[in-house]
Every structure is written in structure tokens, then in C-alpha cells.
Image (tube, grey):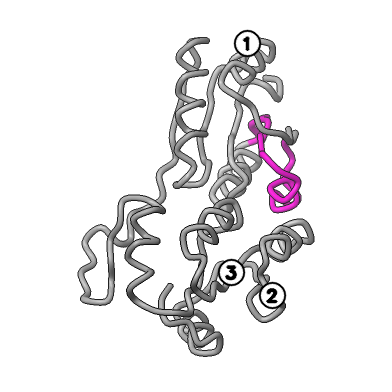
Amino acid sequence: MNHGDVLVIGGTSDARAICQQLDAADVRYTLSVATPTGERLAGDIRGQIRCGRMEWQQMAEWLRAQRTRWVIDASHPYAEVVSQNIVRACASVGVLLSRYQRPEQLSDLRHPLLHVVGDLNEACAVARRLGERILLTTGSKDLAAWRAGLAEKTLLARVLPVPEVVQHCSDLGFGVGEIFALCGPFSAEFNAAFYRQCRAMLW
């Protein structure tokens, strides 16, 4: 079995955990990540790492060239376009696809302070009427959209502690006291203390 037989996609802790299980089973694979940040987060896995974004046509060509037999989609839960591209590429080449789905933690949770929304625009609409200091913990990819949708608010960003992410926040106008560069996972106790410390009104 060569490294191209199995392709794991995702720069997430879930993807890394899957790679570690493949390592333990002595299965050779390639991990595909979109950015150098994802590459660093992969740590000391034994598989090869491919860094760079792919449209579905490029992905299909790669799968064909590597004679890939199995793709594991462990991309971020909100990366819907990525997952759609993966589905399309695998279907066009006839490759087995598995999608790792994180356990749903909020589907049955009901609380008067919890607001369920369908997308980022709806989230911005809800946030506008709820408070002035808003903590974002959704990653750095959509910070520009949050900034545009909540231009009149004070935004706080909890992001990964890597230079290009912090620079991205700075480029978008986040100040020193508005960038929190931290690496999870975080306990409930840590989060509660963190929310108090940064004086966020909603998150």
C-alpha cells in the first residue's frame, strides 16, 4: 500500500487523531491540509502531508494520479464548500468516501441565552441586538465577514497562536487587546474564566 491509497483531508484535531489511528494500524496515507497552519497542527504523524487548497477538478486529478482508494473527509464542520468539492471529486473518480462527523453537542440543548442560527449573516443579525463586546471563537477564516457584518461592534477573536493568523487579525483591524492566541482543547472551567476575563457580552 502506498501513501496515496488513503487520503485524509483536514487541518483539524479530528484529522490528526484519525492519522494517529492509521499510524497505530500501520496504514500508509497522505494528509491534505489547506494551509501551513494545518501542517504544523498535524504534529509528528508518520504520513505524508500535502499542503495547499484544491478545487474539485484538481482533487480528482490528484486522486486519479495517486490511485487513491479511500478518502476520509475530516475537514472543519463549517467548511461546507470543501466537503462539497470532496464529494464531487470522489464521485467523478469512483473513490470510496467517508465523512467524519463530530458528535453533535448542541442539538438537544435548550437555554434562553442560546440562539441557534443558520449561517453567519443570521448570526450577525442576532448579535447586533444583543451586545457590544462579541467574542468570536469560530476560527480566522471568516473574520473579515464578521468584521463587515458587525462593523459597529467591538470584536474579540480567539484564534490559533501562529504568526500568520495573528497577522491576519491585525490586518483586519483587531487590536492588541482584541486578539487571544490560544490552542485548545479548552475545559468548561477555562472557558468560563476566559469569558469573564475578556468581558465578552456574547460568544
Which mark sits nearer the N-terminus, 1 or 2? 1
State the residue at coordinates (69%, 75%): 175
Q: Report the amino acid beneath label 3.
A: Ala
Residue 127 inside the magenta-drawn segment:
no
- Quarter of the image for residue 65 reads top right
- Classify 10 Å Cα crowding around label 1: few (below 14), some (14-19), many (20 and above): some
Which mark sits nearer the N-terminus, 3 or 1? 1
The kind of secondary structure element at disc 3 is strand
* Residue that badge 2 annotates: 175
* Residue that badge 3 annotates: 157
Tag 1–tag 2 contact (CB < 8 Å): no
Find residue 186 and report its horizontal and vertical position in percent: 53, 73
Find residue 179 and report its horizontal and vertical position in percent: 66, 73
State the residue at coordinates (23%, 66%): 109
Residue 64 numbered tag: 1
Q: Report the amino acid beneath label 2.
A: Gly
Residue 43 inside the magenta-drawn segment:
yes
- The residue mark sitting in front, 3 or 1, is 3
Find residue 18 and report its horizontal and vertical position in percent: 56, 43
In the image, residue 115 above or below residue 58: below
- The residue mark sitting in front, 2 or 3, is 2
State the residue at coordinates (66%, 34%): 32
Q: Nearer the viewer, residue 140 or 25?
A: 140
Q: Which residues are magenta?
A: 26-47
The kind of secondary structure element at disc 2 is loop
Which mark sits nearer the N-terminus, 2 or 3? 3
- Cα separation between marks 2 and 3: 10 Å
- Cα separation between marks 1 and 2: 46 Å
Residue 15 located left or right of residue 115: right
- Classify 10 Å Cα crowding around label 2: few (below 14), some (14-19), many (20 and above): few
- The residue mark sitting in front, 1 or 2, is 2
